[in-house]
Each structure stands twice: as C-alpha cells, then as structure tokens.
Image (cartoon, coloured by chain):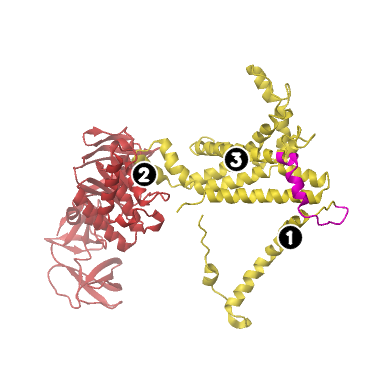
Amino acid sequence: MTVSVERKGAALARPGGMRASGFSMRTKRLLWVWGFLALPILFYSVIRFYPTLQAFWLSLTNWDLLRPAKFIGFTNYTKLFSDPQFWKVFKNTFTYLILGTPISLVLAFAIAFFLDRVRFLHGFIRALYFLPYLTTAAAMAWVWRWFYQPPPIGIINDVFGMLGLPQQPFIRSTDQALYSIMVTAIWAGLGFQIIIFMAGLRAISTTFYEAARIDGLGEWAILRKITLPLLKPTTVFLVVFSSIGFLRIFDQVYNMTTNDPGGPLGSTKPLVLMIYQTAFNSYAMGYAAAQTVVLFTILLIVSLLQLWILREKK
Amino acid sequence: MATIELDKIVKRYGKIEAVKGIDLSIADGEFVVFVGPSGCGKSTTLRMIAGLEEISDGTLKIGEDVVNEREPKQRNIAMVFQNYAIYPHMSVRQNIGFGLYTSKLSKAEKDKRIEDAGKILGLEALLDRRPAALSGGQRQRVAIGRAMVRDPAAFLFDEPLSNLDAQLRSQMRIEIKRLHQRLKTTTVYVTHDQIEAMTMADRIVVMKDGNILQVGTPSELYENPVDVFTARFIGSPSMNLVAGQRTGAGVSLVASGDLLIGVRPHDLLARPTPAGGNGFSLTGRVTAVEPLGPETLVHLDTAGTSVIATARDKFVPEVGRQLSCEAATGSLYLFDAGTEKFLGRS
C-alpha cells in the first residue's frame, strides 16, 4: 500500500481572513484546525484510548471489582496460556476466521458478480440479500435456532426427512454446532459484502471488458486477468473487515446458545464470549483484561498481516 | 489486411434507429474517418464493425466473409479506445502483450513482437513501467501497441485523441498517420474533430442523424460539400453563410433571397482599403478581432448576420469601425435556401 500524505496542501490554498485580529494567517488557520479537531480528540482520548491503556494495566492486576487492584505481574498471562479452556476458545475463534472469511467472500463475490448482470428485479433481489444485514442478531439467531431444531419444528431437518436424509443434531452437537453458527454468521454479513463488491464491480470501466473481448479473452480469463486484479482494493477492504468481524464474533454465538452460552461444552465459544464470561460472570477483571490484550494483539497481527500480503506490489 | 463492406447497416435501440441503413465500402489499406456531431451514429457504426454492438439489420463483410454473427475476436480487428483501456495493474510490456493473449505464437515470437511494437512507438525505455507512470500520449501509444502486435485485418479507432491536450493531439495525429503509411492496414477512425478528419483521412465519411451525408476525399469535401451541414462542418473556422439571390451571371446580397451564399473565412479578406475588384463584397461593423499571428480573424456584424473574415499582412482592424471585405470570384459556394443543398460554385 502506498500512502501519500498531502503536506497541508488544501489548508494552505484556502483563502484566509484578514490580519486584523493580530494573529498571522498561519496561526489563525492552525487555531481553526485544532479547534475543530479538539472535540473528537478529547472524545477518543477519554472514551477509547484511556480505557484501552487502562486494560493493559488491569491485565497485570488481580482486580475483581470489590478489592482494589493489586499488581501481580504476568500471572494472568501465564494462567491464561496454561488454561486448556483458552486454547479451545482460541481454536474456535480461528476456525470462525479461517473458514468464515474465505467462504463468505467467495459467496459474496459470486452473488455480486452474477447479480450485477441481472436486470430483472435487480433492486428487489439486492434488497433481499441486504435484509439480513439490517436485522438484529438476536432475532436472526432465534429464527435460525428454530431452523436447526428437530422436526417438526426445524425446517432443515424437515427437508432432510422428505429427501430421506438422516436427521442432524446441528447446534446440539459438539461437532456441528460451530459450523451451524458459522453459517448464520456468514449469511448475516453477506448482504453488506455483496453491496460493496457490486460497487467495486460497477467502478470498473466497461471499455476494459470491451478491449478484452476484442483481444479474444473468454469469460474465465477476463475474470482472472481483469476483474479480480482491478477489484483488489475492494477485496482487501472486505478481507480485513470480515476477518475482524469473525475474530470478534459474539452475538451470533451468544444468542444461538443462550441456555449454555458458547456450548455445548464450549464447542462454539469464541474469545470474546470467554472474555465476557470471565469479566461479568466470574468478575475476574484482571484475567479478562489479559484475554482482551491477547485478542487485541491477534486482531492487530492479523490485520497488519493481511494488509502486507495484499499490498500493492511495485 | 482486408476490405470492409457495409450494406444497409441498421442499428435500432428499441424503436429508435441510431444508424439508418448505411452503405459504405472501405478498400484494403484505406484510412477512412467517420466524422460528425455527437449522437450522429459514428461510434455506433464503429462498434458494430468491431462486434461490440449487434447489427440490427444489413450485412457487414470483412474481407470475403459476412461477420454479422461473429465474436469480436473472430473478426480479427483491433480497437483503440478514447480512454485507452490499458490495464493499470499490468506493466507496459504486459499491456502490449495482452493483445497476444490468445495467440498461439511462441514466447520468443511474442516477445519479439512486443519489442518491435515498443520500438516503432518509441516505448522501449518504458516497457517495464506501470501505466500510472506514463503521460496521456504515452498511454495512448501503449493502447496502439496492443492493437499493433495482433497484426489485425483492420484497426478501429474510437476518438483516440479526445483525451489529449491540443499539442499532443497534433503530434499523435501525425504519428498515427505515419504508422498507417508504414503498416498499410485498413483503418477506420471515428472523431468529432474535423481537423483530425481532414489531416488524416484518405476518405472522410460525414454522418448526421444516423445517415451518411457525404463520402469523399478531404479536398472533395472541402471544395464540393453536398449541403450546408457538410460545408459548415468541414473547415475551421466554419463557412460564413449569408442570404442572397442570383443576378445575371453573379450573385447579390438580399435579406430574403432564395440562395444561401457561403464563403470561407480564409477567402473573405479584410483590407485597410478595399481593392474594389468586381468580386463579392460584404460590409459590416467589426465586433471582435482574434489575432493569430500570421493573420487575424475579424468578426463582423453585417445586417444582423455574424460573419468571420481574415485580415492578412499584420492588419488588425479596431473594434467598432465599419469595414468592407471581399472574396474573389470563384470562391463562393451557393446553396438552395430551402433544401440547403449545394448548387455550385460562383
């Protein structure tokens, strides 16, 4: 990625006021600029950056809401890394990420690619795909829970029954629950990704395709040599965006497994849900903070890694 | 190389006819320029030849074959677009080589063709650059290079110079013309710029409202336009038109005559003192002058009609004065005032 920072360009070119107030034009502009920036900076410092730093500190203490926090060094971390529950959750989280992101992106791209060519009821179909994105996760999760029930309530097992296929336990099985939840999470995010992919596809000039047709490229070659490379900025954005989404997955899991959040037997539990339970069920704030710091580090590494892998090669 | 035959070609969009049954035959190796205002159907015609638009009616032959139902690739034509259509994610070499994507040549043969095209177009030093690092003129050359390596039956150009500045445009004009003289490939070139048409074409096709108005060499069109539209479209600045009528052997100015008298600004000379010949003369008030260096364009208001004349020999008349301008016998174009058809010279 190349980032070009325009050196105060726009601000300098703007016509300024008069010198009457005693400040020089440059000083006045700086006062305006910082005046406008002050509010968001203040907001972010108090609401975002301070708690973030506080979490780093808390992760080194044994705070439990009742007694004052006491510095205990890296005890929380050593405890975390030797906790089999953590490694289970770690594995779950990465399963969501490593399967969820590519599957959802390939699906979204395929749908966007073909929907882009459909003229008949185009707006309506696009709205249908986008609808899940507008729905609350709680409502969606409940509907999917019903889908996954045994017959006659569960529609999926109903269909399986009609087709003569064996019944599946879905979210009641330790093997299938995670994948069942992943399907709903993919489905929920699909609408957004389709919209972004379609905007990216629309932005590619049609003359590129016409030139390629004249050069005799087939559909597949056009897709591989022109569409996908020109769509790269969109793809990078969606890969990072969707990865962060799967790494932070919480509401889908929590709402689909309300009786035993993250169950059965922790087989669907992601890192965020573990943090939530450590903090607000066990009130081990220091331990939860340590888990948060680990999640933060993972998010940072994954995002930077993706940006580096998908960077513009010179 | 090949001939191109258009036989009653029609393009319909729903009920609208964009191209209304045009006939044209383009000889092998000929450079034909389609010219006309926006929406006249020239680009649509080119795109039908390319195979990017379906032909609603009529037959199109390239060489000996009817190609109406053939894919662009099977027609073996190459096309250069107004916005170049070169791929930003590929180097110049890859872009030029993209024209050979489906070719069965060996790698070495392909490389040689790319190198050759680069050499002809002066791109050798830039072959490994990305398009983002090129100027507009260089990008257009890359697009031409991609068309060249294919060794196509015909080149199609769709307003290729419209995105370039005036200086580059005149330079590229010459380069494309030289390239044609060198390769001798049949070329169809679409433009709305009559200067490009005049300077590059073997034959010009003037189009308006989906019809061909006139086909001819640049000098034929300039000297014998079929009607007022062609006469005013070809030549810059546009031909002056004033109402008049026949008087014996000559013509005279009348406010509501049955003739339109056309005179090109270059033939209508403004002098400090009238020469008093027996040619055609116009008198009016100077409303503006445009000094161009070797000559000055003088805008005159003659009885409500605006006319442009030329002043030579460093003569720049002042704005507001009355001035007489003269045109030599034989330099006038006469048109029927009703049908606007060309009647002859006078």
Circle 3 chain: A
Magenta includes B249? no
List the residue tagged with mark 2: A211
Q: Is residue B199 above or below residue A132?
A: below
Residue found at the far top of this picture: A164
Residue A247 is marked as none
Q: Nearer the viewer, residue B24 or A72?
A: A72
Q: CA distance from mark 3 to mark 1?
A: 31 Å
Q: Which image quadrant: the N terminus of chain B?
A: top left
The magenta region covers: A65-87
Give the mark nearer the N terminus: 3 vs 1: 1
Provide residue A259's location: percent of width, then percent of height. Answer: 80, 34
Residue at image position (66%, 51%) is A297
Provide residue B296's location: percent of width, then percent of height. Answer: 25, 72
Magenta includes A68? yes
Circle 2 chain: A
Circle 2: residue type: Ala
List the residue tagged with mark 1: A50
Q: Is residue B58 above or below residue B30?
A: above
Q: CA distance from mark 3 to mark 2?
A: 33 Å
List the residue tagged with mark 3: A101
Look at the numbered discs 3 and 2 and tell me whether their residues touch, using CB distance below 8 Å. no
